[in-house]
Image (cartoon, rainbow, N blue to C red):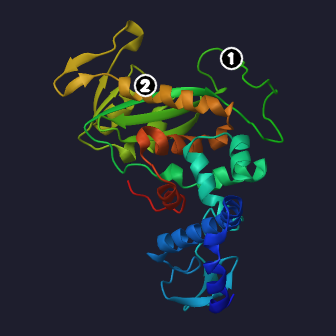
Amino acid sequence: MKAPKFARLFAQLPKLNQPQRQKVLAALHPAAGLDRVIALIGEIRSIGRRCPDCACERCYRHGQANDLQRYRCCSCGRTFNDLTGTPLARLRLKGKWLAYLEVVLDSRSVRSAAKLVGVHRNTAFRWRHRFLDRVKDDRPARLSGIVEADEMFLLESQKGARKLDRQPRKRGGRAALRGISHHLDCILVARDRSGQTIDAVTGRGALKAAQLVRHLLPKLDQQALLVTDANAAYAAFARAHGIAHQAVNLSAGERVRKGAEGAIHVQHVNAYHRRFKEWLARFHGVASHRLPNYLGWHWALDGGRVPSVEQLLRIAFGVINS
């Protein structure tokens, strides 16, 4: 629209009655959402923009497509946009992304999110795991001081799988074997007294020292005091790597004891387990291979760590602020 025509149209807006104004706002809302998300994407990706093929930082503008600016690499000649090479590539309906991230912050179910945003439930599910793909990597670099570690177990689930490696069971069923077995997913959680937390799905069955080497050792400060329950895997891990270790004998009724470094207990990490399980229950079972995404989602929400959709979008692009 040319400027004079727009000026005449804009001058008529005060004459609109309330239903007409609401109709205009409803018509402009999707476009406003699209403009806002495009501006945010450009702002997030402007720092360190580089070719996803050869990593060259020299590029120039090369037209537009699908509401996004395209670029051509000066080195390899490949064209790309700010979504190329990210989990959000080729997702449509960008004008609804920020509204969808609002329901992610509210921990809505797939069907509830789809209804609120106005998309199909399959789209809502696909968006959930695209946006959470890099959220699970937003973790602290190190745990220091007194570090509590403990594992929790969830019934393994092959929800959504076309083929099962076991007999099917009803949703919410029980493991075929008693106690800790390969029918349970083991989730390791470690948390220091400042609230910094890491977690990992170590596999099925009991926790092993080799899994602690893989998931806990790279994050554990050498001067840290590791506090756990009496699981022998922690003691073997600590001895092998020269890590100070204190165990609390929960089975004997010991909950807290005094130590030179402070109170020795695993109550903080156990409280985190409880909050995660209570939060996860609203989804009525999740597939085991999706658990890392849900752990990342809960960590982002726990304690209000990610308060805005803008910050959540940044993390979805891999802009991690640990």
Mark yes or no: residue 312 visible: yes
Compared to residue 114, the image places residue 60 above or below, namely: below
How many angstroms separate mark 2 from mark 1 (CA)?
Answer: 24 Å
Q: Residues within 10 Å of mark 1 (few under 14, many from 20)?
A: few
Q: Nearer the viewer, residue 223 or 196?
A: 196
Q: Secondary structure at mark 2?
A: helix
What residue occupies the far left of the structure in this picture?
A: 260
Q: Residue at x 48, y 69 (%)?
A: 44
Q: Residues within 10 Å of mark 2 (few under 14, many from 20)?
A: some
Count of numbered labels shown in the rendering: 2
Task: Estimate the x, y position of residue 231 in percent, counting from the top left.
Answer: 43, 22
Q: Secondary structure at mark 1?
A: loop
Q: Is residue 101 left or right of residue 115?
A: left
| Number of the front mark, 2 or 1 | 2
Q: Residue at x 49, y 25 (%)?
A: 274
Task: Estimate the x, y position of residue 306 in percent, counting from the top left.
Answer: 45, 49
Q: Residue at x 43, y 43 (%)?
A: 304
Task: Estimate the x, y position of residue 23 in percent, counting from the top left.
Answer: 71, 62
Residue named by callout 2: 270
- Asked which quadrant contains residue 166, the reply is top right
Q: Which mark is residue 177?
A: 1
For the N terminus, give its image quadrant: bottom right
- Amino acid carrying label 1: it is Leu
Q: Nearer the viewer, residue 187 or 112?
A: 112
- Amino acid carrying label 2: it is Asn
